[in-house]
Amino acid sequence: MKHSLCPYLFKLSMVFGLALIQISAHAAEKKNIVLIAGKQSHGPGAHEHNAGVQLFAKCLRAAVPELVDVKVHLNAEWPAAEELKSADTILIYADGFNMHPALQGDHLQQLSAEMNRGCGFMALHWATEVPKNKGEAEFLDWMGGYCDPIWSVNPHWLANFTTLPQHPITSGVHPFSTTDEWYFHMRFREGMASVKPILTAVPPDSTMSRPDGARSGNPDVRKDVANKVPQHVAWAAERPGGGRGFGFTGGHFHQGWANNDQRKLVLNAILWTAKASVPANGVESVVTEEDLKQNLDPKPAPKAKVPLPKP
């Protein structure tokens, strides 16, 4: 009896040991996702950075818990150095230009060190914008393009994305349309080197209703719109060192994340930039109206307009 149990116990211990090894290896394969939200900005329902990144985190944790470990930073809180060093991708959803979280203190230098080792990088909406003299070179390198306030424009318009390219980021995403503050006429790497347009649409003439000025218009963009030149508002990029980047100019309205295809596109991009496997049908997630109401910034309601007295 004693001898007959030995082979059985040995096999059982081997199976158990292998299972533990597989579980440990599987855990080690998880990608570290760092989501950084900017401070409160704009009115209710707009630039809801804090609610947006928490919604992304909830979707990822529910859909692909075996693939990712997600850390969220709110109100422009900057991650500790050790967390940045272990990040597989870093997403920033915040106000841009001089208010950009990446441009404060030595953050640009910290990010450069992580990009040099192959970390992914993503910027959403206004976070795609940096000044030419601070951030242009880095953003062109890290994600292949950026919003230049003296070249790019930020009108609100209905963008119809009638066709999508074949790319892991578009897995399970269908053509869709949304009204948003879609920035366009972006600055890209020379010759679009290693840059893949993901969302492209033709802006209507109404996008040029404002006078020339920063973010509103210039002769070059007016010519493009008049000639119906398609504009890229989301794109993926690869770096020679192996890093990946993604830029997405929509995201002004929090309600936009209720669109299943828009949301899936960004969730897919998070996995792709982290070098995780994107599911064949993309990252499946369900978002309810209650989900969208969670974590909104405490913004006062717009003041009601007082009607002018009749003459």
Image: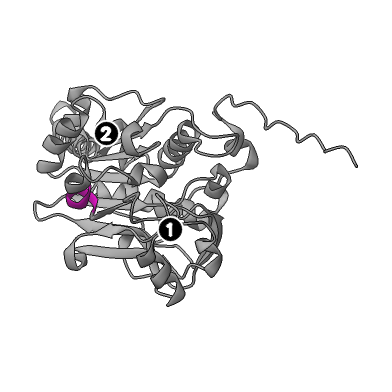
Q: Residue at x 46, y 31 (%)?
A: 50
Query: Residue reaching furthest front?
Result: 311
Q: Position of residue 307 (x, y in %)?
A: 82, 38
Q: Position of residue 29 (x, y in %)?
A: 21, 41
Q: Residue at x 43, y 27 (%)?
A: 39
**Which residues are drawn in magenta?**
139-143
Residue that carries the numbered disc 2 in the rendered image: 102
Q: Is residue 272 visible?
A: no
Along the horizontal axis of the image, is 68 left or right of 20?
Answer: right
Precedes in sequence: disc 2 or disc 1: 2
Query: Quadrant where the C terminus lies?
Result: top right
Residue that carries the numbered disc 1 in the rendered image: 217
Q: Is residue 30 magenta?
A: no
Given residues 64 and 145, the one toward you in this image is: 145
Q: Is residue 227 visible?
A: yes
**Which quadrant holds residue 2?**
top left
Callout 1: SS: loop
Q: Position of residue 302 (x, y in %)?
A: 67, 32
Callout 2: SS: helix
